[in-house]
Image: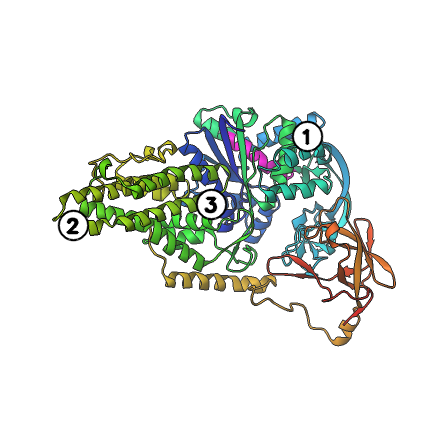
Amino acid sequence: MNNPKRYLITAALPYANGLKHVGHLAGCYLPADTYVRYLKAQKRDVVFVCGSDEHGTAIPIQATKEGTTPQAIIDKYHTIIKQNFDDLSISFDIYHRTSAPLHHETAQEFFTYLNDRGELEIKESEQYYDEATKTFLADRYIKGTCPNCGYDNAFGDQCERCGTSLSPDELINPVSTISGNAPIKKATKHWYLPLNKHEAWLREWILKEHANDWRSTVVGQCKSWIEGGLQPRAVTRDLDWGIKVPLPDAEGKMLYVWFDAPIGYISATKQWALDNNKDWKPYWYNQDTQLVHFIGKDNIVFHCIIFPVMLKLHGNIVPTNVPSNEFLNLEGDKMSTSRNWKLEMQDYIDDFVNKENGGKQCVDMLRYYLTQIAPETKDSEFTWKGFQDAINSELVSIFGNFVNRTWVLMHKLCGGKVPKLHDDVLDDTDKLLVTDIQQAKTKIQSLLEEYKFREALFEVIDLSRKGNQYMQKKEPWIVAKTLEANPDNQKLIDNALHLCLQLTANLAILVNPFLPNTATKLCYMMKVVDKMLDWENAGKIRLLSVGYSLREPQLLFRKIEDEEIAVQIEKLKANSKPQIEKTNKVEEKQHPEVNTKSEIVFDDFAKIDLKVGTIISAEKVEKADKLLKLEVDLGFEKRTIVSGIALHFKPEDIVGKQVTVVTNLAPRKMRGIESNGMILMAEDSEGKLHFVKPETVINAGAGVS
């Protein structure tokens, strides 16, 4: 869309079941805020919506942990998360709640609209049921042994040891977390969204129309889902917490959280419109609106496949782009709430923003570092040493240093006022700086339009670096020593400091989307109103009037001391150890727990028959996103083995690979397929799986001992 009339920007709704960490902030909220601030500086019509996701099993589970009610949980964490975003200068136009009556009405209307038009299917299926509590069990209310790593405390939706996504049917020996009993299968009726009917449209829309302008990681994941074959997806579930299905024959059924949560963007827009006496409909129905979803990569399928199908069927516009970020790791390991290996937004606020030596400058320091290391195309890593280096070596020593030198010299050599620009003594060095200022605007604008925030921020810092280089060439403090002999040299000083001041004004405009508090402070020092930050002013060199008095210099940023970094690293390690030991997780990448199971004797190990096999065919298991059906040649026979590795390997890439197989494992059925054996896998520190195999190709059937 070349010239959209309006923009609707969304950031993924965070679950109101606990505090959120800086990985969440870097994943979608900070890049979304940066983009919105840029659009608003462009004076474009833009609405930025978000809110708490307050339904689903995560809420009652957290309520059980804290010994309270689901309502108390969402009230508590909605308030904290909203305040955290505000403290870190995330500028939502509205931060709404999916527990709000308006959202319930909107989600129920959406469901009714689709159902009345025959866009949903009703199916009866067997699901796990706890006879003792007379409850159909959501995935998180089922635990069992992980089929991939053998962890005996895996949930029905994910193994928290190996990180593999699961379904309850894949668990070995599943039990109810409510009663502790083994659940039974019981028939239940639900409504489904038949995604399979919309594959052709999704192929055309994503794989053709947006193949080149969406991030390759987004298109790649969508392609994998579509080519794997989409299946109908339930939009209702048996649960006692959520939005009731608005039908008389749906007693005890709620809208599935994945269905109701994205509709929260619409209800939030409605509430914003009510609060501001606006019409919400153009933002969701008019084709001249640009809808952009900022998300993390774990939300790609919902925002690029499922929600767009829902929107299309409901008559709404579909997203123009879905800039998805990868994951942000922490000090050499994955961020994990369950393992307490994280840096929460609240922790940073408490330790830096709310300190006497912190405040808003520390907000921008975090925003700077998270943007600099943003996981835009691949996973990246937050380290406290990296944070210190970025602040001290770049923000303080380059950006802050340039501004401070300019202000100090302006007050010392020009009486604290903007000096005149003397055209008669302008030289090539002066003209090159003017060109650099003008070109910087063009570069940064282009990068921001393409959602390349890391590169755009680099260009801002690079412009301040060029300012430092220019000042070093001009050396106005040296020229000042010649004034007694040659008073006309004041013109050279005036020109140098005039251009440095105009460059500072440009830096305020260009840095504003990234570091809004810094831009505001620069406006204060320049004694100008925030209107100067309008994007149309960037690239100009007549922003500050000649003879205008400016305030005394103020330091924009402070240095981060070694002692502060040591405290944070020690705090991270100290807080994580008890939780890691409790949950049987890897403590650190360098020191993994090698053995967490009970000790066995050699005779026990000798019972396991391990042999080398060769994969001769592989295919995805129907209606199972994580399973591959493998035919493995063991030399003496060929066997069918079902393995939960589909998220890590493409079928065509593993044919011919040699693997180690447990050959005397009792057969078990998975998705109706009898699996005769288990493939041994190794997991690296990034959570990726690797085959355990011989160093060189050997005969299939060779024993492993």
| SS type, badge 3 | helix
With respect to residue 123, does 678 lie above or below? Answer: below
Q: Earlier in the sequence, mark 3 or mark 1?
A: 1
**Which corner quadrant holds the C terminus?**
bottom right
Q: What whole-number distance in Å separates the C-alpha atoms at marks 2 and 3?
A: 42 Å
Magenta span includes 260: yes
Q: What whole-number distance in Å separates the C-alpha atoms at marks 2 and 1?
A: 88 Å
Point out the frontmost of discs 2 and 1. 2
**Residue 617 in sight here:** yes
Q: Residue at x 42, y 33 (%)?
A: 40
The numbered mark at residue 664 is: none
Name the amino acid, label 3. Glu
Q: Earlier in the sequence, mark 2 or mark 3?
A: 3
150 relative position to 481: left or right: right
Q: Earlier in the sequence, mark 2 or mark 1?
A: 1
Marker count (numbered): 3
The numbered mark at residue 482 is: 2
The numbered mark at residue 455 is: 3
Residue 56 x/y as whole percent: 61, 43
Name the amino acid, label 2. Thr
Point out the frontmost of discs 3 and 1. 3
Residue matched to label 1: 247
352 or 547, which lies in front?
Answer: 547
Q: Residue at x 65, y 52 (%)?
A: 158
Q: What whole-number distance in Å separates the C-alpha atoms at marks 3 and 1?
A: 51 Å
Dot 2, crowdedness within 10 Å: few (<14), some or many (≥20)?
few
Q: What colouring method underlies this structural image?
A: rainbow
The overriding secondary structure of the stretch rendered in magenta is: helix
Dot 3, crowdedness within 10 Å: few (<14), some or many (≥20)?
some
Magenta span includes 581: no
